[in-house]
Amino acid sequence: MDCKVDSLISLMTLDEKIGQMNQYNGFWDITGPKQDKLSQEKITHLRQGLVGSMLNVTGVDEVTYVQKIAVEESRLGIPLIIGFDVIHGFKTISPIPLAESASWDLKAIKQSAAMTAEEAAAHGINWTFAPMVDIYRDARWGRVMEGAGEDPYLGSKIATARVKGFQGEDLSNHRTIAACAKHFAAYGFAEAGKEYNTVDIGTSTLHNIVFPPFKAAKDAGVKTFMNSFNEINGIPATASRFLQRDVLKSEWGFDGFIVSDWDSIGELHEHGVAETDADAASLAINAGSDMDMESGCYVNELKTLVESGAINEALIDDAVKRILKVKFELGLFEDPYKYCNIERQHIVTGQPKFHDAALGMAKKSIVLLKNEGILPLKKSGLRVGLIGQLAADKDSPLGGWRGKADYNSAVSVYEGLKKYTGNSLSYEKGVDVFPEVASFVKEVKVNPKDPSGIKKAVDFAKNKDVVIMVLGEHGFQSGEGRSRTKLDFPGDQQAMLEAVYKVNKNIVLVVNSGRPLVLTWADQNLPAVVQAWQLGTQSGNAIASVLYGDYNPSGKLPMSFPRAVGQLPLYYNYKPTGRGVMEEAVFWSHYIDEDNTPLYPFGYGLSYTNFNYQDLDIVNNYEEDGEIIIKISVTNSGKLEGKEVVQLYLHDKYASITQPLRKLKGFELVQLSPGETKQIEFVLTDHELGFYDNSGAFLVEDGEFDVHLGGDSKQTIKKAFRI
Ligand code: GLC
């Protein structure tokens, strides 16, 4: 490979080398602030070999169009790498990534990524800008829908599963695509959850919380990284040598390439660290950004910088070699059109196996938050009423970052339920929350008040045995550019919920959202609450299957759900502080107007059956062979078959750096028949016992540890051991 790359680069002019570092947006979707079309200038640059990659070019016809210009009309004919945001599906849409993460089913998550890759690849795409592996703790941020939640251990396992799902065992296979770990780094720590906001983050949090999923993605062989828009402690990530050269490329030995985020090189000017585009290009290339997404700074400024001696050409060569290597590994030099087969595009798109995978994933992503026995619903003899605009919505369940999904292509809750209820299901929209069709780039319009809609819902609910209410956010109220200051139901939905409750208490609340919402009133009053996120194409079928008990819910929360938005940032792996709990007086770490605990904790999720934990046993072989073996027995004490995520948390009680009271360090998804008991075994090694200090060194320190096991991060049984 190195010989091929070196021989090719020796043929290239400086212009052609810089061309490989230049990525243009295509004709169609705009995912960044600049409104742009494929201009004549871009076509000319393609012909001159001044473009190495394009994004938002999709479909065999469109990809072939631009690839032919690059390959057949430029001097060296170097093929383009074609990137797209294939985040949770291309045409067949799986649940949003935060929902998939609630399954804790790594095999299913990997399979979901593989299905997504195969469908996207059939449309000419050979690189996805996924997985997003940012850790975050603030549900006000719109992009919490896009990742794996608040925990670095779960986030690392899911990052690995998604990278391996997208890239497969053989990247040169036309069903697999290059993946991209993003956004490096700490974008999820934007202050106050405000999109693109400043990030001031402690070294310990950076090393122990933010970096691990990126390191896991790198160790899983991810071919590309994407840097982030945000500054970190005064240095924009795109201009950060520390992040891109010292940590990623040197310390971790990453040998793929880093693409900037959309115009993030150009935005160094807005950050106020670059006066001109030349300054921006210089900062970014010195810091290790290899490819420039849509700013034009590299293609317009780098040549002059090299010729004037301001930039060493070796930096250009290193970036270009990294890019060419990935193109070789994708097999694009052997056959630049290998992803462009129009028959395959027709045959592969929307295949039953994609829908099966999406349905399976959707069922596993649903989290049962409360159930006083009303669920699962009896399949006959019930007068069921369905209320809520979202219940009949076939577009919102696709969520944000929905690839090239067709409009209104999701199965609605109404359609899913009808398969169970036949014509006995009656429906009332109730309040008109979203009066207009929402789009990727526009704010969702919300109707604040609809008293007539509330009256209709109340009259409708009076003579029903059960009322299913689907309430929540529209799919485009989370995702990029969608931070919120409130975590309530938009519009008049809460007023409608409380008005209906006055006439009929048998309400099953199904929540659609791209983030944790504040469900405190529902938890205090309703008999059942189901978190159904945005579940993609098969949404309605999955929800119906769970409500009627054909699938016993098994999801567990990957993010804490707050009692009030004022608790944010909120997360389970918090530090003890010097005054964590005090019985009397006020001088301890708490709020005077709200409980400290989450409404629903990380790792929490109910089932239609019950699981008991017993016989926690520790075999401490650390001194001999560096292992601590933890055994636990789990019993299904209910009447239904069910799945449980057995979770293991560690507390390193005394260390040189303050440690969280709980750190997830193991989990196992187990299926148990009624009455069945299984013994689960976890092995703890230095990798689980250690932590990073503020120099970035990994330490394992002697001392006492508590190990906690259970079905969520709060309800656990514990034992101690020493090393
Ligand atoms: C967007 C996002 C990034 C995405 C890129 C290309 O602004 O920040 O996640 O991959 O631009 O669409």
Image (cartoon, helix red, strand yellow):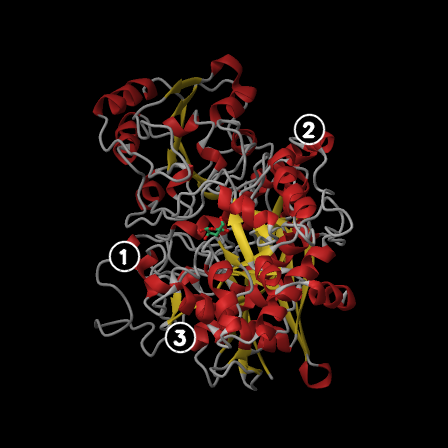
Tell me: 431 left or right of 146: left
Q: Where 653 falls versus 147 (above or below)?
A: below
Classify mark 1: helix, strand or loop. helix
Give amino acid for label 1: Gly
Classify mark 3: helix, strand or loop. loop
Q: Which residue is mark 2?
A: 346
Q: Nearer the viewer, mark 3 or mark 1?
A: 3
Of 411 and 301, the residue lying toward us: 301
Name the outermost residue toward the top. 423
Tell me: 189 left or right of 67: left
* Residue for point 36% across, 44% down: 523
Give amino acid for label 3: Gly
Q: Which residue is mark 3?
A: 202
Q: Is mark 1 within 8 Å of ligand 1?
A: no
> What is the x, y in percent for residue 57?
56, 41
Q: Which residue is mark 1?
A: 566
Q: Is mark 3 within 8 Å of ligand 1?
A: no
The disc placed on residue 329 is none
Q: CA distance from mark 1 to mark 2?
A: 50 Å
Give amino acid for label 2: His
Screen quadrant of the C terminus? bottom right
**How many numbered discs sit on the rendered protein?**
3
Q: Nearer the viewer, mark 2 or mark 3?
A: 2
Tell me: 622 left or right of 307: right
> What is the x, y in percent for residue 544?
53, 29
Tell me: 575 left or right of 548: left
Classify mark 2: helix, strand or loop. helix
* Residue for point 47% across, 59% down: 300
* Residue for point 70% across, 31% down: 342
Q: Residues within 10 Å of mark 2 (few under 14, many from 20)?
A: few
Examine the rendering and report whether any part of residue 100 can be seen. Answer: no
Say whether disc 3 or disc 1 marks the residue closer to the N-terminus. Answer: 3
